[in-house]
Image (cartoon, grey):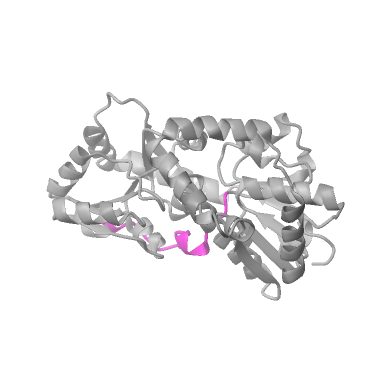
Amino acid sequence: MNIIILTGRFGMGHIKAAEAIKEQILTEHAEHNVEIIDFMDYMFPSISKYIYKGFGFLVSSCSGLYNVLNKTAGGNGTVPLKVAFTRKIDRLIADHRADLIVVAFPVCSQYISAYKRTRRVNIPLYTYITDITAHEEWIAPETDLYFVGDVTTKNTLLSKGVKEEKIIVSGIPVRRCFLQEQGEMQAGTETGCREILIMGGGLGLLPSSDRLLQMLDNHPHLKTTLIAGKNEKLLEEVRKKYRNIQAIGYTDQVERYMKRADLLVTKAGGITTFEAVAARTPLYIVRPFLEQEFGNARYIEEHNIGRVLWDKSTDECRDILELIGNDRLLEEMRANMEKIVQRSEYRPVYKEKGEKPWEKYAPAAV
């Protein structure tokens, strides 16, 4: 069976989701051919880099405008499918001899749904929603199955008219390497020195202030690692100003740093949240500001797997020190993460026992 996974480099979350989906499929079905395709690069090769740069600018410098545009796009829920676009998708499917299309970015769902309607084809379309909040842009009428992170997301889809038989509560997909294996432990358990990991996603938008970094740099009983992603300017600045903070750029071994950390200070991204859940690393979220982050942050609070700093008047330095020093609360958060992984709603393909979801839910060709 030939499967294509469509995604986009809007941050790194959608790319990481696509990689996790590919891994999950091949773990159960090594005989399948699975390819990840950057949909924006394929459809708009001459301008995709400007689309991504514009997205990065909006998120980092004009988050309010980004939120407005995000809501507007969600309200429209359709895309114009010009003849040239239809022919491109024809070629995409033909070149890869695709039997199944999986998407991990909402625009892809809209384009493929419009294509199926225009061409009147029945190629299966599966959509993985990568945040707890599911706005209208994720919902496309020709989608055959939605894979969602939580019952909350399922209920949102039901309220918007999606049929229950089309919704699979699978957990937001993460790669196997993030799973905390039996016998593994956070570094602080062994050394007595607590470890804090700070991440800002692929764009390197750190959820922390200079004052916080200075406090962590000077604290004798804390080890701090900062992952700046592809933000080279930020990486250089942190390395120059803070002698006791280990600052690294882009790395493909995020799981190694996450699994050894006692606390993850980060943005409320859906992928990062579920990677932390898999690694059993409690979260500290500093003032969510993007539309999709709000639902993820509420999920973190409601399930007590981390703490969310909403109020600008709260002293984040004091708050983080209080949390990192509270063994009972950290252990409670880790236990809640364990429940999420073990309960029936969170079922990554590679955790299944005696079941093969891709045979159960995919078309008969599997």
Residue 245: say if magenta. no
How many numbered badges does the structure rendering display?
0
Question: What residue lies at 29% left-to-right and 57% top-to-bottom?
Answer: 232
Question: What residue lies at 73% left-to-right and 51% top-to-bottom?
Answer: 112
Relative to 292, is 143 on the left or the right? Answer: right
Question: What residue lies at 61% left-to-right and 52% top-to-bottom?
Answer: 104
Residue 103 drawn at (x, y percent): 65, 54
Residue 128 drawn at (x, y percent): 64, 50
Give the residues in magenta: 172-188
Residue 41 drawn at (x, y percent): 58, 59
Q: Residue 158 or 66: which is nearer the viewer? A: 66
Relative to 278, is 365 on the left or the right? Answer: right
Q: Is residue 88 above or below residue 27?
A: above
Residue 133 drawn at (x, y percent): 57, 36
Q: Splitting the image into 4 quarters, where does residue 268 fall? A: top left
Q: Is residue 83 above or below residue 132?
A: below
* Quadrant placement of the N terminus: bottom right
Q: Residue 42 or 274: which is nearer the viewer? A: 42
Relative to 55, is 164 on the left or the right? Answer: right
- Asked whether the viewer can see residue 5, the reply is yes
- Asked whether the viewer can see residue 10, the reply is no
Question: What residue lies at 41% left-to-right and 65% top-to-bottom?
Answer: 252
Residue 176: say if magenta. yes
* Quadrant placement of the C terminus: bottom right
Q: Residue 284 or 188: which is nearer the viewer? A: 284
Q: Which residue is the extreme one toward the right?
A: 120
- Magenta stretch prevailing secondary structure: loop
